[in-house]
Amino acid sequence: MSLDNERTTVTSRSRGGTTRMLLPLVVARVVNRLGGFSMGFLGARLSVDLGAPMSLVGPVLAIFGLCTIPSRVLGGVLAHRIGSRRTLVVGLLACALAQAVVALAGSVATVVLGAVLLGLAQEIIEPATQGFVAEQVPAERRASGFALLSAAMSVAGVLAGAVAGLVAPFGVAWLFGVDAITSLAAAAVVAVLLVDVRPPREPGRSWRRSLSPRLLAWTGVGTVYGTLVMVVVLFFPLAVVRAGHPTAYAGWLLAVVAGFAVLAQRAVAHLETRVRPALLLVAGYVVLAGGLALWATGTVTGLLVGAALEGASGSLLLGTQQAVAAGMARPGDEAAVMTTYGLSWGVAAVLAPLVGAPLLERGPQLLWGAAAALAGLLAAGHLAAHLAGRVRGGRGQVRAVAQ
C-alpha cells in the first residue's frame, strides 16, 4: 500500500470514527434544534405579540444575554462534577421550563421572567457538549468534529425553519411551545443514548490552567464574532418584518441559512487538514460580510442570497474557532477551556442587543451595513495576523540558515 493510500485510509477511518462517537450527541442536538428557532423570535414575542417598544426590547434581550454568562459557568462546573450526560439532561429540562413560561405568558413582565430563566438555562449544555468533542476527537479532526455538530444542527435547522414558517402565522408564542417540547425530547435522547465521560479529578486546577493569556485573547476575538452572530440570531426575524416582509418569511430564510451551513461543513471537512485556520477564518469573514451587505438591501433576492452566504460563513468560522480554542487545552482541561472560551458568547449576548436594537430602530439597512463592515474588519485583521506570522516564520528560517 502506498503512503498516499495509507493516509486516505487513516483519514477515512478518522472521519467514520468521529461520526460514530458523536452520533448520540448529534441525535440529541438535532432533536433539540428542531424547536430551536424560537430563540430568534424573543424580540418579536415582546414587540409583535405584546406591543413592547424597542426601547424595552433591547434591554430585555441584554438581560437575557447577561444571564447566559453564569449559565455557561454553571454548565462547566456541572460537567466537571456530574459528567456530560447528566449536565445535558439538566440543561435541556431547564430550557424546556423557561420556554414554557415564555410560551404561556400573557404579559410583558412574564415574558421578561421567562427570558431571565431561559438565559440562566440556555448555556448549561454547551461546556458538556464542546468538552466531549475536545476530549474524544483527535486534534487534527476537531474542526470537522465541531462542524459536524453544527451541520447536524443545520440539517435540523432546515426543518426547523420550515416549522417556524408554518407555525408563526398562529402566533409567536406557539414557537416557544414547540421548542419546550423538543427540549424535553432531547433530554430523553441524551439520558438513554449518550455514554458519559468521567469528570477530571482536579477541577480546580483545570480552571486555573484554563485562564492563560493566549486563551483569554482568543476569547476576546471570539466575543467580537459572537456579537455579530447574536445580532443575527436576535434581530433577523424582526429586521425582516421591519423591511416589509411577513414574519413567516423569516422562518423560510432561516431554513436557507441552515441548508447552506450543511453544504459548507463538507468544505470544512475537506480543507481543515490542508488550509491554515487563519485562512479559513479570512474566507469565512469575507463570505459573512457579503451576506450581511446583501441583507442591507432589504429585497427578497438580497435576503435570500444573503441567507445562503451567512449560513455558509457559520460553518467556516464556528468550527475553526472552537478547534483553535480546544487546541489550547491540556488533557483533562477540555471542559474548563471550552467554558472559558464559551464565555465570549455570554458577553456577546449582552453586547448584541445593546448595539443592535438602536441600529435596527434606525432601519435594517444601518444594522446590516454596520455588521457587514465589522465582518470585513475581522477578515482584514486575521489576514494581517496570518501575513505577520509568515514574515516572522521566514525571518526565523533565515536566521537558522545563517547559523
Image (cartoon, helix red, strand yellow):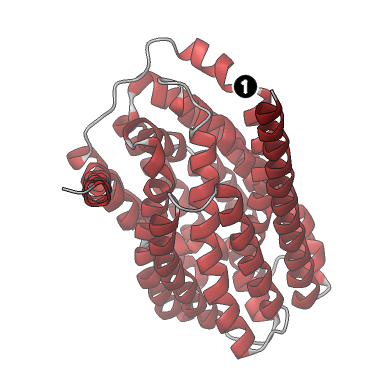
Residue 177 shows in this picture: no
Q: Position of residue 197 (x, y in %)?
A: 29, 27
Q: Residue furthest left?
A: 1
Q: Nearer the viewer, residue 12 or 156?
A: 12
Q: Nearer the viewer, residue 403 or 174?
A: 403
Q: Position of residue 36 (x, y in %)?
A: 43, 59
Locate residue 44 relative to residue 296 in the image: left or right: left
Identify which residue is drawn at 32% across, 33% down.
136
Residue to which mark 1 is pinned: 211
The picture quadrant where one finds residue 195 is top left
Q: Quadrant of the C terminus?
A: top right
Q: Position of residue 288 (x, y in %)?
A: 63, 66
Identify which residue is drawn at 72% across, 55% down.
378
Give above or below for 77 relative to 58.
Answer: above
Give above or below for 304 relative to 225.
Answer: below
Identify which residue is drawn at 49% across, 71% down.
257
Locate residue 348 relative to residue 204 in the image: left or right: right
Q: Position of residue 162 (x, y in %)?
A: 39, 77
Q: Residue furthest front?
A: 402
Q: Nearer the viewer, residue 187 or 298?
A: 298
Residue 42 shows in this picture: yes
